Image (cartoon, rainbow, N blue to C red):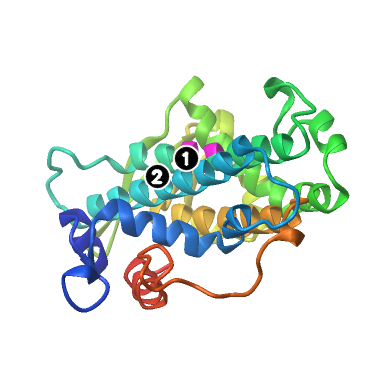
Amino acid sequence: VIGLHQRVRSRVILGEGFGGVLGTWQVEMIQARALLPESARAFTATGAPLPSGAVRLVGAACQRLGRALRARDQLLLSSVQRVRSFGVDDPDDAVERVAIALQGMFDALARSLNESLGGLLPVGSVGFHQKTFLKSIPESSRQVASDPRFRALRDVIAELRNTVHHEPVGRAASEVRGMVEELVTLPRTSAERFLRNADELGHRERWVAFDVEQTGLALRPIALCDDIITEAATSANLLLASFPWSESADDSGETDDSNWLENAEYLAMNQLLYGL
């Protein structure tokens, strides 16, 4: 709650003095880089120069993860406000935004990999769900993208994101012993595939509050978003480690504490304030 309060005010205290006070956009990027440590290799590769587009797209993937963190903050804020105020997303909107941002992160990584391989495929054929693309990438990357757990996660994100094309994620609530729990709903058309993939990930009980046969699923939005953000970051990090340029990157482990994006003290404190 302390971290959320500071991020809402865009005044996050990570260290001593004026220099230790950062804005929300900065701590989002610090946390994104912390969740994707392999992304730093794109900027330190010492072999053949990477296409500039490949590097920019790794940066774009970090930005997309930062947007997922921002939507998560909106979700957390909505859970502690009894009366919704202007500028605070409803839980259903926040869940959709998290899913869209995470889908964008994986799309950016796929395009970065394609660029690093010389742009072999047209953009419309690039994606970790595309068979043609999977056949064109190195075996190490293909193994990560073909892992059943990654495919289940990708499908969960897709089910949430694809509601923009049909029935939207909705709102619900459950009251137990006088305590009201805010929930979001997923339409019946998406429910069965969502449940299969939730089972594959081992999260059905944690995510699903109840299943109404006629209408769909009632989901716990905070647990859902926390899990898909951390799972997506883990998968993205594995993908980045498998990229062909990762072996030529500077692996000295040295950081520049004068750079707010690399400061070890800021990194540790920021992770505590995010709780991820």
- Left or right, 16 with reference to 93: left
Q: Is residue 200 visible?
A: no
Residue at the spot 27% in from the left edge and 54% down from the top edge? 24
Residue 231 location in percent, x, y?
A: 58, 58
Between 37 and 224, the residue placed more toward the observer is 37
Disc 2 element: helix
**In the figure, 262 relative to 150: above or below?**
below
Disc 1 element: helix
Between 137 and 150, the residue placed more toward the observer is 137
Stretch in magenta? 100-104
- Left or right, 205 with reference to 15: right
Q: Which residue is mark 1?
A: 101
Residue 144 location in percent, x, y?
A: 77, 53
- Circle on res. 67: 2
Residue at the spot 39% in from the left edge and 52% down from the top edge? 69
For label 2, count other residues whose C-alpha is less than 10 Å away and answer few (under 14), some (14-19) or many (20+): many
**Labels 2 and 1 touching (C-beta < 8 A):** yes
User: What is the three-letter code of the residue carrying label 2?
Assistant: Arg
